[in-house]
Image: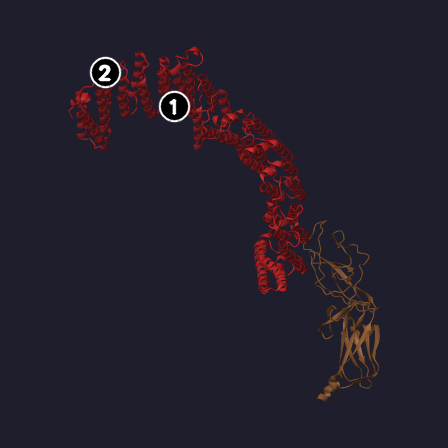
Chain colours: A red, B brown
Amino acid sequence: MIADGVEDEEKWLSAGIAGLQQNAFYMHRALDSNNLKDALKYSAQMLSELRTSRLSPHKYYELYMRAFDELRKLEIFFKEETSRGCSIVELYELVQHAGNILPRLYLLCTVGSVYIKSKEAPAKDVLKDLVEMCRGIEHPLRGLFLRSYLSQVSRDKLPDIGSEYEGDADTVMDAVEFVLQNFTEMNKLWVRMQHQGPTREKDKREKERSELRELVGKNLHVLSQIEGVDLEMYKEIVLPRLLEQIINCKDELAQYYLMDCIIQVFPDEYHLQTLETLLNACPQLQSSVDVKTVLSRLMERLSNYAATGGEVLTEFFQVEAFAKLNNAIGKVIEAQDSLPIAGVVTLYASLLTFTLQVHPDRLDYVDQILGACVLKLSEREKLDDNKATKQIVALLSAPLDKYKDIDTALKLSNYPRVMEFLNDGTNKEMANVIIQNIMKNKTRISTAEKVDALFELIKGLIRDLDEVHNDELDEDFQEEQNSVARLIQMLHSDDPEEMLKIINTVRKHILTGGAKRLPYTVPPLIFDSLKLVRRLEGQDESASGDEASTTPKKIFQIVAQTIEALTSIPAPELALALYLQCAEAANDSDLEPVAYEFFTQAYILYEEEITDSKAQVTSIHLIIGTLQRMHVFGVENRDALTHKATGYSAKLLKKPDQCRAVYACSHMFWLDEHDSIRDGERVLLCLKRAIRIGNAVQQMSNATKGNSGSVVLFIEILNKYLYFYEKGVAQITVESIQGLIELIRSEMQGDGSSSDPAADAFLASTLRYIQFQKDKGGAVGEKYKLIIV
Amino acid sequence: MNFIIGAFKSACNISVTFSDGRSRKQVPLKKENGQTVMVPLFQSKENITGTISIEPVSGKKVEHNGIKIELLGQIEMYFDKGNFYDFTSLVRELDVPGEIYERKTFPFEFSTVEMPYETYNGVNVRLRYVLKVTISRGYAGSITEYQDFVVRNFSPLPPINNSIKMEVGIEDCLHIEFEYNKSKRRESTGSGANTHVETETLAKFELMDGAPVRGESIPIRLFLSPYEMTPTYRNINNKFSVKYYLNLVLVDEEDRRYFKQQEITIYRLVEAS
């Protein structure tokens, strides 16, 4: 059926076009031979095609455009006709002899255009006659197009100020009156269109009607182009008349479109000066009209206008734009019960944007808006409306974008209250926006109070907001937590005491985060704390006056407690690493007991919690590395710790791991920069033990696989020998090195040895190093010369 | 052959010349044979003066029993063709019986002639004014010559000229009111004779397209100039009348038609020039 309808319509359209073209052909002939009578006859016949009721607006438009083109030619002909001496007045009468009204009026408008140009009668009289006569077409579609034609041919002939058609008296009024009248009539026709035809096609009709809206809206554009419409006239005449028509037509589609048209078409300054009138119209519109979008658009325009800055802003103050808008929005929300919450928030978001633009200094306004928003939100359940949450994010982001400073947002008491109404997902999103904003603008948040507020704000990221524990260990989660970590790193106060407070505050917040978050949030906090410790190091002598408050010791206590939280997760490796970091910091602060305590904690973790052999290897190397750098310990403590470390090393599961850990232990006994830690014996002991383990590895390999394993371990040990030899450890002799090289070579040439290119290359480069050092000469060169390869 | 022609040919040429013929307005008049000729235009109570000139054909003498000129106002009904009813008849004797040898002219004059009716050419009736010149001869039969002229009378502005209202519609459903700002003009239909009513549609003129809403008022402007019209004639000499009507037709969506008729009076005003 529908397909048929469309096909039929195509057929009717092409029939219409054919009829039109045929008559246009005869009309052209008449024009060419200056035959006025025939020209009128055929043009009227041609225009009769527009009398059809069978076409949809879209198709009718196509037909109309063709007729329009032809009418241009006819108009030129009429003009020539008058220059040939034909009286325009007669012509004006002559075209009215046409029997059918539609062609008659098209012709009348066409001649009318020439009439005005001839200036034989005042433009206003002709226009008045035309716009009145057009009332004869009461069919909505045909009437709309006819009046659109009238508007088209007359727009350059209005008796506007400065126009050549301007009369002596106040003719701008006539121009305005003409356009207003045509607009009013067109709108009436347009609105009436919805009632034509069966109800079941109403949707389709409304769609078609929507396509025609520009015909009506064009009139407003014409109005805005009239020079003579100054603010005064706009305020006193144009706007009230427009609004009267818009309100009275009681049609949703028209009201929405035309309000928007007014907003878009007339200058910002006019809107500002007529704000009250415009806003008062809003509650009078049909309740189904999307007033919020209308208002949003208006505020958007005004915001942009305000952005031009300067004197413009004072105008805003003069008209009390904020109060008026705020009031209007309140009324609209009040009036429209059915307004979805998304709409409410959109309105407030627009108002907020406007306020930020116009009154950037009025934080109280901003807070007021947020407060109103909270009020509305609190009337309903938690938001799950996608649109609404999106709008809230926009609403909350606006102040951040404007002030580029979270400080300001933190001053807004209603800001966190709005966030309360977000669902978890959005809350997180918003928190992310806030963090991004801070990072982008490198905002410094330097008081504990603000930090507290901030963390309260972004609590969506800091802790689980509800009981639902879904597996969030996905990328998004990591990303979020990394953001939080970065945020923690950015907190800084120059005042150590304040900084300590900040650390305490952050700690308080992050400890609520649960097992999933702590591994992300604890490390940055620890490092923040250690940073503070190092800062104090430089000044603790000078600022010893108020020792009581902020001391490294105190910080270390906090840190220790914080790390403890990790053990409950459990995240022993991370905790161990952090303990070692702290120990090192304590070392730098010369706090031996503290450092020792940290080590103890690390060791306990190692013994009790770290069971995975790979993790053990990593941890033991960390321990060794850290311990090597520690210089704060007395002999006793140090012995205890190193003893334990070597013990752990020898107890690793895999032999090669044992071997490597043991030779690494050798470093713990020799520190270049500390005379107290130079124990050649123990170094040698470690290395020898490593060789022993290496041998064991070889034997095991022979036993299990039938070939000796790699000699890489031996080469590694050789390198350690060379290192200590170079450092001048007396216990490391040339002979022992020599012996080791021999051992390696024999192993490599041995029966069961498999060739290992990596080992070959390693050995070769080690030997090359020896050679290189020999060639270098000097003390080192002398030493190396003793080694014979 | 010449003889035969001569026998049927009138023995002389008669021509009528109006004394102000050069300056008098000429209007077209449709003759019985369909041809249109230009004839002078008079109005009631004017003097009709001129000269008759009689010229015998090629030297023949014309013997007569007297020459007269008549001014006739006639009504001819087409159902009774050839039978003229003279409502006006004036006679002037021009010459006593005698002979005419050569071209001879006679002045004539009808002063302040009452010509109450206008010349009219209708479907069933004709009203005409004619000057008839008769040269009476005995057995040979009279020689006559006709000269048509047209009479148009101007009427004063009718005293009542208020607006007229017409209403057409379907009860309780649709009413459309028509209002004309003057009652004595505009739109037109029909012309009739007293017994025979003949209606003729002069023009169809579409006033409105589409359905108006309540309270809408639609301007109407109809120019009468393209139509051949006469003033309204009421009971001309008890013979015929010509009346004009506005016939309003309302066509609804189902193509049903509703009618309303209103007579309008057409009158002729003195031309401004």
Of residues A585 and A215, the one nearer the viewer is A215
User: Taking A537 as reference, is B98 above or below it?
Assistant: below
- What numbered label is drawn on residue A574? 1
Q: Which residue is mark 2?
A: A681
Q: Quadrant of the C terminus of chain A?
A: top left
Crowdedness of circle 2 by 10 Å Cα count: few (<14), some, many (20+)? some
Q: What type is the residue that disc 1 sits on?
A: Leu
What chain is tagged by disc 2? A
How far across and how far down the image is residue B156, in percent?
80, 60
| Separation (CA) of disc 2 from disc 1 | 34 Å
How far across and how far down the image is residue B45, in percent?
82, 67
Crowdedness of circle 1 by 10 Å Cα count: few (<14), some, many (20+)? some
User: Taking A119 as reference, is A326 above or below it?
Assistant: above
Label 1: state its secondary structure.
Answer: helix
Q: Residue furthest top?
A: A545
Of residues A140 and B53, the one nearer the viewer is B53
Q: Is residue B52 visible?
A: yes
Q: Is residue A570 left or right of residue A99?
A: left
**Disc 2, disc 1: CB below 8 Å?**
no
Q: Is residue A607 left or right of residue A306?
A: left
User: Taking A203 as reference, is A627 above or below it?
Assistant: above
Q: What type is the residue that disc 2 sits on?
A: Glu
User: Taking A402 as reference, is B245 above or below it?
Assistant: below
